[in-house]
Image (cartoon, grey):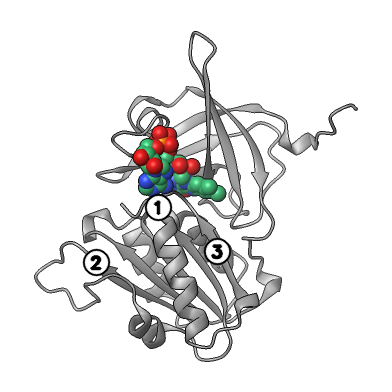
């Protein structure tokens, strides 16, 4: 039987137009993808690398840019023993071509018309799809209540720290809570431990929020379990697992 392919899922090449460090271990990649038909906040792309001998490796990366942005932004965290991420963070240069397909995924996605209140919980690079939602919410002029709880190892490893601070400062209905698990600045007043049930209870919006949880697999599973334990409606908890270990 002939394979049925959705045209949007065909492999194509995007051009890297800009790269910059997001943190010491993560790189932001801005891509120009010819014919890109747009995406929903929360979706991802697949990236495929092909070696000279034909060997291929494929990984998924969430889109961090808003649907309103015509460039596709990815944020890749470098895993030292990784096959794909060190190439993306260390080797790619503006002008390089990158093979990708997407956008992919419809479940872990949010559009302004979906409403709220919203409760976002992220660990590390798990902020990427939630940042697309936060940026989309701002671009669409949505004022639904949105609380973000974001776990990072340290302030310098907090991806999008300044942009999140600026958005929260200018938007009374967006609240950003950070927890820094490994080291904290001397004047730190935020949380300084792994996300737990008490923390979730303290920062969750009050009324039956739509929850999106994204990050390392153990963080996502424990947060989803705790949210259900706190009485959240499991049907309103959406999760995206980035990888097998906690980092
Ligand atoms: C839907 C989806 C979206 C994703 N979006 C992003 C994103 O926006 N940014 C991003 O940096 N990554 C993202 N990931 C993870 C990404 O796809 C890769 O798994 C990651 O970059 C590691 O690939 P690698 O080839 O470098 O490591 P591999 O060679 O696959 O693995 C190297 C080692 O690291 C472990 N490992 C693999 N993945 C992870 C992980 N995520 N965390 C901790 N340890 C891991 C492996 O068990 C192994 O021990 C996403 C994953 C999914 C499924």
Q: Earlier in the sequence, mark 3 or mark 2?
A: 2
Label for residue 180?
2
Is label 1's Cβ within 8 Å of ligand 1? Answer: yes
Front in this rendered view, residue 30 or 43: 43
Quadrant of ligand 1: it is top left
Residue 221 higher or lower than 119, as above or below: above
Q: Nearer the viewer, mark 3 or mark 1?
A: 3
Near mark 1 (Cα within 10 A), the count class, few <14, some 14-19 or many ≥20, is: many
Q: Check disc 3: other Cα within 10 Å, few if <14, some if 14-19, many if 20+.
A: some
Residue indicated by mark 3: 239
- Is residue 159 rendered to the left or right of residue 227? left
Q: Looking at this view, is 173 or 110 the one in front?
A: 110
Helix, strand or loop status at disc 1:
helix
Is residue 205 shown to the viewer in this render? yes
Q: Are marks 3 and 2 in contact (CB under 8 Å)?
A: no
Q: Residue furthest bottom?
A: 206
Q: Is residue 57 above or below residue 162?
A: above
Q: Position of residue 128 (x, y in %)?
A: 47, 54
**SS under mark 3:** strand
Residue pictured at 50% horizontal, 55% vertical? 241
- Where is mark 1, residue-wise? 125
């Amino acid at each position: 039987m002939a394979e049925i392919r959705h045209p949007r899922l065909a492999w194509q090449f995007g051009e890297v137009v800009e790269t910059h460090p997001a943190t010491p271990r993560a790189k932001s990649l801005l891509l120009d993808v010819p014919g890109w038909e747009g995406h929903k906040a929360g979706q991802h792309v697949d990236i495929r690398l092909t070696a000279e001998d034909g060997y291929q490796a494929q990984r998924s990366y969430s889109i961090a840019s808003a649907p309103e942005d015509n460039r596709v932004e990815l944020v890749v965290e470098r895993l030292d023993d990784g096959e794909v991420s060190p190439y993306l963070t260390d080797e790619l240069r503006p002008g390089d071509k990158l093979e990708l397909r997407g956008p992919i995924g419809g479940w872990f996605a949010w559009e302004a018309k979906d409403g709220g209140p919203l409760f976002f919980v992220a660990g590390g690079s798990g902020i990427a799809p939630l940042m697309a939602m936060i940026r989309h919410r701002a671009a669409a002029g949505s004022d639904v209540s949105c609380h973000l709880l974001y776990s990072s190892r340290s302030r310098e490893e907090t991806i999008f720290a300044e942009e999140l601070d600026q958005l929260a400062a200018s938007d009374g209905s967006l609240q950003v809570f950070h927890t820094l698990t490994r080291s904290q600045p001397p004047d730190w007043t935020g949380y300084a431990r792994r996300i737990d049930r008490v923390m979730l209870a303290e920062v969750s919006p009050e009324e039956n929020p739509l929850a999106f949880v994204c990050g390392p697999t153990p963080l996502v599973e424990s947060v989803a379990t705790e949210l259900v334990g706190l009485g959240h409606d499991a049907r309103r908890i959406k999760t995206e697992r980035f990888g097998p270990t906690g980092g």
